[in-house]
């Protein structure tokens, strides 16, 4: 096992990793920007190193400074958390060059699965269903039109290296396709440095269902069930739950089996997530793979009892999985609400500021992952997610009831948050019935706008 781990991140995920390390008896090193000098993750770590000023590009994304922090402190491994450098293949490879263990997959694996067109091809070759679309990248406008007319409109234009909805556009006909190609390419190039695109058939009203995967260096791969991430806004997840209200045991075995087979075929090592689109007839299609720990990983931890971060660390240390697929069972139901410092009444605009009052909910089945404390400041330089509130119960109904109670208890004063939005969702008839998909929130918004216009 590692003698010391540097956590190359901030906020709640840095604390989450440090807690796992502490339970394993591994000392930790925090990195921080000048703005985060008094942050909880800095206080919680055994050692801390400032890596630059507030902007993330000059601190949390400064690879040279992070490697220097490892050398100064004698850290043997680096855990990247999620975001920042978590899926940066160059960073993983630089760690290796400097004799450091990157707690995650290899840089080459990240490149393959980060290239959506390559990932799609590799999964298809492994027998995993993929959405009908281009076999590779779109080479010209004529090629795009040919693909779209072959699979049928509507289609989705997607960035080769996309994420977070960037470089993604829907086209309902040939005119929209041609108009959106250059827009999507320019957005992708600005965000990811590549304007390459591919095209997929747009599924109407699909659910976003993802499977948590663990793979070790000996070729053992297991899945830990699914998470339903269909409650989204602009392709950003807001609420996650496990198990999915739409997935039967038979469907779980088939989807999970395909996820495992795909990861085994590509030799995947570490924690990862295979994401699918699920249609209303039970058909499912590979969408993408995330080669890191996910924001929503605690949902899976609550229903399986498996500490995913500890497993990541053990796998990186060369240990074999001690989890057998037949011994993994989902226990009860878990729901996660992402609490953001955003104003739902102002189109979810980010709202940095100082927290003046703060009270965390508790009681049976409640978990809160956060880096907040009374008096702390929400910086404009970083992501607006400030907490993850989770509820676990014996049934979905009990988990939602506990979440409703916890949201009522959660007090954050000083900045607007998405707590009121989540409270409304926990009483929403479509959510309560489990009848929702990735377009549910957008349809509700349009209906509200139409009603406001009519009145």
Image (tube, rainbow, N blue to C red):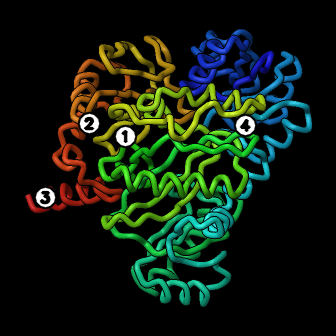
Label located before the other in sequence (3 or 1): 1
Disc 3/disc 2 C-alpha distance (Å): 32 Å
Work out whether residue 327 or residue 212 is closer to the camera in this orientation and state it.
327
Label located before the other in sequence (3 or 4): 4
Disc 3/disc 1 C-alpha distance (Å): 30 Å
Disc 4/disc 1 C-alpha distance (Å): 31 Å
Q: What residue is pinned by disc 2?
A: 396
Residue at 57% across / 27% down in the picture? 13
Report if the CB atoms under discs 4 and 1 are less than 8 Å apart.
Answer: no
Residue at 47% across / 83% down in the picture? 151
- Element under disc 2: helix
Residue at 44% across / 61% down in the picture? 277
Q: What residue is pinned by disc 3?
A: 451
- Element under disc 4: loop
Disc 1/disc 2 C-alpha distance (Å): 9 Å
Disc 3/disc 4 C-alpha distance (Å): 45 Å
Q: What residue is pinned by disc 4?
A: 61
Question: x and y percent of residue 238 in the render?
Answer: 39, 42
Q: What residue is pinned by disc 1?
A: 241
Work out whether residue 344 or residue 149 is closer to the camera in this orientation and state it.
149
């Amino acid at each position: 096992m590692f003698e010391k781990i540097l956590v190359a991140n901030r906020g709640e995920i840095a604390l989450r990793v440090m807690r796992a390390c502490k339970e394993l008896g591994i000392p930790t090193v925090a990195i921080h920007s000048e703005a985060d000098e008094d942050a909880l993750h800095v206080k919680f770590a055994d050692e801390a190193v400032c890596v630059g000023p507030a902007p993330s590009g000059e601190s949390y994304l400064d690879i040279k400074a992070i490697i220097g922090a490892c050398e100064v402190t004698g850290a043997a491994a680096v855990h990247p958390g999620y975001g920042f450098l978590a899926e940066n293949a160059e960073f993983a490879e630089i760690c290796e060059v400097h004799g450091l263990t990157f707690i995650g997959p290899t840089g080459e694996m990240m490149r393959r699965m980060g290239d959506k067109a390559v990932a799609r091809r590799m999964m298809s070759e492994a027998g995993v269903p993929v959405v009908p679309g281009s076999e590779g990248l779109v080479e010209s406008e004529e090629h795009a039109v040919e693909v779209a007319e072959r699979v049928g409109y509507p289609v989705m234009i997607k960035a080769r290296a996309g994420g977070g909805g960037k470089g993604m556009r829907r086209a309902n006909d040939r005119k929209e396709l041609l108009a959106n190609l250059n827009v999507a390419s320019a957005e992708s190039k600005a965000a990811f440095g590549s304007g390459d695109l591919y095209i997929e058939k747009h599924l109407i009203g699909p659910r976003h269902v993802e499977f948590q995967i663990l793979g070790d260096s000996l070729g053992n791969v297991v899945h830990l069930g699914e998470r339903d991430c269909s409650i989204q806004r602009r392709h950003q997840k807001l609420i996650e739950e496990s198990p999915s209200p739409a997935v039967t045991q038979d469907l779980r075995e088939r989807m999970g089996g395909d996820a495992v087979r795909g990861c085994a075929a590509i030799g995947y090592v570490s924690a990862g997530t295979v994401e699918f689109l699920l249609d209303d007839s039970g058909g499912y299609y590979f969408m993408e793979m995330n080669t890191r720990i996910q924001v929503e990983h605690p949902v899976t931890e609550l229903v399986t009892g498996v500490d995913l971060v500890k497993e990541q660390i053990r796998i990186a240390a060369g240990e074999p999985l001690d989890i057998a697929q037949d011994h993994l069972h989902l226990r009860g139901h878990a729901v996660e609400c992402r609490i953001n410092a955003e104003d739902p009444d102002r189109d979810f605009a980010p709202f940095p500021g100082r927290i003046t009052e703060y009270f965390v909910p508790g009681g049976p089945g409640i978990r809160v992952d956060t880096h907040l404390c009374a008096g702390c400041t929400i910086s404009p330089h970083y992501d607006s997610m400030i907490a993850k509130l989770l509820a676990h119960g014996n049934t979905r109904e009990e988990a939602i009831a506990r979440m409703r109670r916890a949201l009522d208890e959660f007090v954050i004063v000083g900045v607007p948050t998405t707590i009121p939005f989540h409270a409304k969702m926990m009483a929403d008839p479509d959510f309560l019935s489990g009848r929702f998909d990735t377009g549910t929130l957008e349809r509700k918004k349009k209906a509200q706008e139409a009603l406001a216009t009519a009145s």
